[in-house]
Amino acid sequence: MQSIADVLYANPVLLNPIKNWSTLDPFKDLIDLIHVNHIPSQGTNYLYAIGTPSSPMKFFSYSEEFKKLISDADGNLKLHLHDGFINEEYARRLYQDILFKCYGIEKITQNSFQTLLRLTDDSEGYKRYYHFITNNQFVDINYSGALPELNNEWVEYAKGNISSINEVKRQIPLDRFGLEGFILFTVKDETINEALNELRENVATMYTLSRKDAYLRIKNNTLSLLQKKSIEVGFLPLIDINKKIFYHKSFNYTSILFKILQKHLTTASLNDFLGRFIEMCSQRHESAIQMFNNTSNEVSNELTEYLIAEGVKSFSIIPVFHQQNLVGVIELASSETEQITPDDVRKIESAMPMYSEFIVYQTNKLHEQMESFIMHNYTAIQPVVEWKFNEIAWNTMQKAPNTKLPDISFKELTPFYGAVDIKNSSIERQKAIRKDSDEHLKRVEAILSKFGETDTISKEHISSWQNSLEENLADEQELNLRLFIEKASQDLLENYPEADIDFSHEEELNYEQSLLMINNALKEILDIQEQKLKKNIPVYFDKFRTDGWEYTIYAGQSLSPDIEVTSDMILKIKEWELETMLNMGIVAASLYKKLPYKLETTQLILANTSPLDIRFRADEHRFDVEGSYSIRYEVVKKRIDKVHIRDTDERLTQPGKIAIVYIYANEIEVYLRAIEKSVEQGLLLNEIEYLDLEDLQGVIGLKAIRVTMKSNNA
């Protein structure tokens, strides 16, 4: 260490800024000495460099391995910074160095620090990730003028007690500090680990993207994981319609296999081949299939011929299973012989849970589109009533052509209704929009302060909109504000291209993502509970999404001529309702800490024992209630979600609670017995609130009971 310092002080040329690297040519021994003393040995893969501390980064000494990896002949980075070098880790280290070297604060850790550079290599076509382990001991920091007064927040951030630089109210003016000297770099390849991390992140957020955008992100993650530009990646989700696998052209962009087969087969032949192909994959369970090494059956031989015709010389199929069911395959293809190795397959298999979730998402999205199409053009005919439609259709076909399809009625049905809603969803969405808008206006204001007003955007405009944000915005005002911010961003970009103009809708996206996360979890529970109920009792079950999820159930003998619907079955449905509300409430509460935007749910059941009638209106393609009592029941359903407790401003529905609305005491007897069981199981508190509710238009005499879920679940 002393000998290095001696050489530096003995040669003043080394103490001044160096712009021409040839100045260092006579000091090769000094650089070798720095290598020996301060760069740890890494074996044969020796990745190190010595470079400048400020941007643009330049390297004046480096190993051949380092040069080949990331720098061009002039010592410049040949790879593109993906997320930027100045990230949270780098900022915290810079704060540590400034506080240590400029303010003399020595209690902050000064060990070598790892900064992750996210780099994209255009020549390879996929991202590579590296940890640059830096040694800053030869860097000096200076400040033009008198040092700013020390702020304790800077120290807390440097120590890691403040998680983000954005939380530091008055930040260090970094642009006033200068860095002199050199940094020692050693490099560790973290491409595989970071590719897995990014894959995990993209799978978690794919619900906010279109199917195609989600696919492209997952594909790019996979290419980074494999680190081979000669391999093409494809995904083949399986579309199961009435227990048969069908070809669907919407997956042409995801599947290598589809692209090839559609050139050689008709749609009918492709569907037939696909069925045989899937059977082959199912028999192999979770083991990969190397097509050119697998000539044991007719399907693989036929597929090999198609692959050869398209210039594919290496093709691997990795089956993807979800809950022991084959849901799709991952395809690896190459135009080079034996390019795909067992190690490539192992990398894919290491991330199989994420690929499984991605493929299930792709198939679910398509099924949702199909359901939406059916609901829009026809009607959803549930199996429990399909027999009735077949009967009417057959009888009508025996009559004259164009005979009007008669209404289909079901008499004396017991109705059930429940809803899990997002508390104050409209208010929370407004809050998110207002917070984003406020941030956008502040950014516009800051740019105007720095660069000046434009012909169309002034601080007066900003102030006017900021005042409007203090009140609730009407829908038209909200739209006008969005248009103003969009116009402002375009105007500022044209006038000040060097300005940082990034108007992301972070809070609104967080809200939408949180809403989606909750609703996906609720739907999964409701789907499971629906199948559980239908397995034992013939019911007409209708569920639909609002801000949360609602269900309407009808049960009665007229729905099922072959199965006796007993009074015990009706009681079981009420027990099912409480169990379902508990499960949905618990799952929603368990998500709370994970949500980027904190939302809570409320749980509501409408108790009713009086039967009603429903009929299918052929002209409107839907079921509807009939009779005055039935219509009154529908009115109650639509109004109780916002009902208040009598003589108070308190809403009946509250997070962490289950409310059951009724008129007659005998309607809640079964619920009370079910509540008692749940209390014994430790799911509910042993406290039941008996409440009178305010009168609603056309509805009086409503009452409710309310129970609270255990705090560890709520």
Image (cartoon, rainbow, N blue to C red):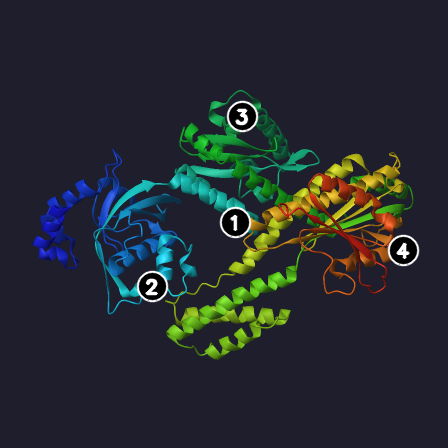
Q: Earlier in the sequence, mark 3 or mark 2?
A: 2
Looking at the rendered image, the disc whose residue lies closer to the viewer, 3 or 4, is 4
* Circle on res. 213: 1
Mark 3 and mark 2: span between their CA atoms?
A: 65 Å
Q: Earlier in the sequence, mark 1 or mark 3?
A: 1
Q: Earlier in the sequence, mark 1 or mark 2?
A: 2
Left or right: 389 in relation to 233? right
369 or 598: nearer the viewer: 598
Q: Residue at x 73, y 38 (%)?
A: 531
Callout 1 secondary element? helix
Looking at the rendered image, the disc whose residue lies closer to the viewer, 1 or 3, is 1
Callout 2 secondary element? loop
> Residue 323 location, x and y as percent?
61, 33
Asked which quadrant contains residue 563, the reply is top right
* Disc 4 + disc 2, Cβ < 8 Å: no
Q: Residue at x 36, y 64 (%)?
A: 171
Q: Residue at x 38, y 57 (%)?
A: 156
Alpha-carbon neighbours of circle 2 within 10 Å: few (<14), some, or many (≥20)? some
> Residue 244 location, x and y as percent?
67, 33
Residue 24 appears in the picture as rendered: yes
Disc 1 marks a residue whose amino acid type is Asp
Asked which quadrant contains residue 469, the reply is bottom right
> Residue 340 location, x and y as percent?
42, 31
Alpha-carbon neighbours of circle 3 within 10 Å: few (<14), some, or many (≥20)? some
Disc 2 marks a residue whose amino acid type is Ile
Residue identifier under label 4: 629
Residue identifier under label 2: 172
Mark 1 and mark 4: span between their CA atoms?
A: 50 Å
Mark 4 and mark 2: span between their CA atoms?
A: 71 Å
Left or right: 325 in relation to 549? left
* Circle on res. 300: 3
